[in-house]
Image (tube, grey):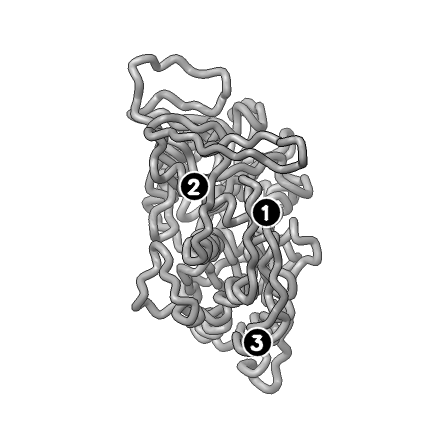
């Protein structure tokens, strides 16, 4: 048992799109940065750099939160595999090191750590996380909490059905009395990054040349026009070029795309006004009905075929499930006696939940599917930041509760029983 009242705990949410880190008890994370990292083959000179984002203790050099600067031969990689679980532990170590030393500037042996984890994570991944954290950073105590449980706490609920619209996937999970019901969990590969890739494919179809800022120079001419010249860097990797293009596509998605407040019909919207978006090189692209179609994919994945677009990582023959299908499957997978509570406590979290009208659309899509005597209610913070950071905020709330302090797994317990104890301490 560990009493963690003396020093504020650190809450770390390593998501598939971004990392959120900060102190328990705070309203928002102190730092947010991409979870994708830059890697280069190890050079002969292993001196650390002054930028602070480099970790040189492995077979590769890792660059965390430092992809704005283009480097010859630098690949961009995610620590997560296609299944949404951690695979590259060297990248995770580099991310933790950067978060603790450069962003939070803390002594890790002075702060207990609460780490979030995907709801479908395996025992092997959990034990590896515990082992690395205690062996490398020696916190006095540690706790692992499932993402949907934390998101549920963020909206003040111990029981809810959490719809987490994350980067790599959309995950729907039932939470009952503070525990995730594993058999209820359903996932779809259609997450925020897939929508970003749809935007990129749409721009390619429109013959729009998406040029990242490193690939051109732009000078202002006297009449307010720009003189843009291409710059060639032949040693730029494909993964880095794609990463920078995705940043542009993601900004277009967030700036221009809108979720219709009722079921979308392409024929009804074919004459919607065009909306202009200015690309970094000064060119503009006009987006029509696609700005409604793209977020609508969350509710009507079959629109992908109508748009004639294929997305990396999503097989054209794979049956993608809509949000309403995921919710129904999750509820049907749950025990009968908790279903009514789940229908009345549908919690939204994740970056893609920030689309306007998302709460209304989810309620509308599920209205006809709910039992007659059950009220469907979607709980979504009006503050979009709280939705985006719901997992981290739930961790901040949990780790600062006085009643929680007896639940930590202490460093002493780890030394006595090993990493496998985490299965009992943090079920």
Q: Looking at the rendered structure, which numbered label has been put on residue 263?
A: 3
Residue ID at (43%, 32%): 133
Q: Nearer the viewer, residue 31 or 307?
A: 307
Work out whether 109 lies above or below 294.
above
Q: Nearer the viewer, mark 3 or mark 1?
A: 1
Question: How would you rate the neighbour count of disc 1 (Cα within 10 Å): few for under 14, some for 14-19, many for 20 or more?
Answer: few
Q: Looking at the rendered structure, which numbered label has been put on residue 243?
A: 2
Question: How would you rate the neighbour count of disc 3 (Cα within 10 Å): few for under 14, some for 14-19, many for 20 or more?
Answer: few
Work out whether 181 lies above or below 328.
above
Q: Is residue 78 left or right of residue 248?
A: left
Q: Is residue 417 left or right of residue 253?
A: left
Decide if residue 367 is in sight here: yes
Q: Looking at the rendered structure, which numbered label has been put on residue 278?
A: 1
Residue ID at (62%, 35%): 30
Residue ID at (54%, 35%): 2
Q: Position of residue 161 (x, y in %)?
A: 54, 65
Q: Residue 308's image quarter?
A: bottom left
Residue ID at (42%, 71%): 306
């Amino acid at each position: 048992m560990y009493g963690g009242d003396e020093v504020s705990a650190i809450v770390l949410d390593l998501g598939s799109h971004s990392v959120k880190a900060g102190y328990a008890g705070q309203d928002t994370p102190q730092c947010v940065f991409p979870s994708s990292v830059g890697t280069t083959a190890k050079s002969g000179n292993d001196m650390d750099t002054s930028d602070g984002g480099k970790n040189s203790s492995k077979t590769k050099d890792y660059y965390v939160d430092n992809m704005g600067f283009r480097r010859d031969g630098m690949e961009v990689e995610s620590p997560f595999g296609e299944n949404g679980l951690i695979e590259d532990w060297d990248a995770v170590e580099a991310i933790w090191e950067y978060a603790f030393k450069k962003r939070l500037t803390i002594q890790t042996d002075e702060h207990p750590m609460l780490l979030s984890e995907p709801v479908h994570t395996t025992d092997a991944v959990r034990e590896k996380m515990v082992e690395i954290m205690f062996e490398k950073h020696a916190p006095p105590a540690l706790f692992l909490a499932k993402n949907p449980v934390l998101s549920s706490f963020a909206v003040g609920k111990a029981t809810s059905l959490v719809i987490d619209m994350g980067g790599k996937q959309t995950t729907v999970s039932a939470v009952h009395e503070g525990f995730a019901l594993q058999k209820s969990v359903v996932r779809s590969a259609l997450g925020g990054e897939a929508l970003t890739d749809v935007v990129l494919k749409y721009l390619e179809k429109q013959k729009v040349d998406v040029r990242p800022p490193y690939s051109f120079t732009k000078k202002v001419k006297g009449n307010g026009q720009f003189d843009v010249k291409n710059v060639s860097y032949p040693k730029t990797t494909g993964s880095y070029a794609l990463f920078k293009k995705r940043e542009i596509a993601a900004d277009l998605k967030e700036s221009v795309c809108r979720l219709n407040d009722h079921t979308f019909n392409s024929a009804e919207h074919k004459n919607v006004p065009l909306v202009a978006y200015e690309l970094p090189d000064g060119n503009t692209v006009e987006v029509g009905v696609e700005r409604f179609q793209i977020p609508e994919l969350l509710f009507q994945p079959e629109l992908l075929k109508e748009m004639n677009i294929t997305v990396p990582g999503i097989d054209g023959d794979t049956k993608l499930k809509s949000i309403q299908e995921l919710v129904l499957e999750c509820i049907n997978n749950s025990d009968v006696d908790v279903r009514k509570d789940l229908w009345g406590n549908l919690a939204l979290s994740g970056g893609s939940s920030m689309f306007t009208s998302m709460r209304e659309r989810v309620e509308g899509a599920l209205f006809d599917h709910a039992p007659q005597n059950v009220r469907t209610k979607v709980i979504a913070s009006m503050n979009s930041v709280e939705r985006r950071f719901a997992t981290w905020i739930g961790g901040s709330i949990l780790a600062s509760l006085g009643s929680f302090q007896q639940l930590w797994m202490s460093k002493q317990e780890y030394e006595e029983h090993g990493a496998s104890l985490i299965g009992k301490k943090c079920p």
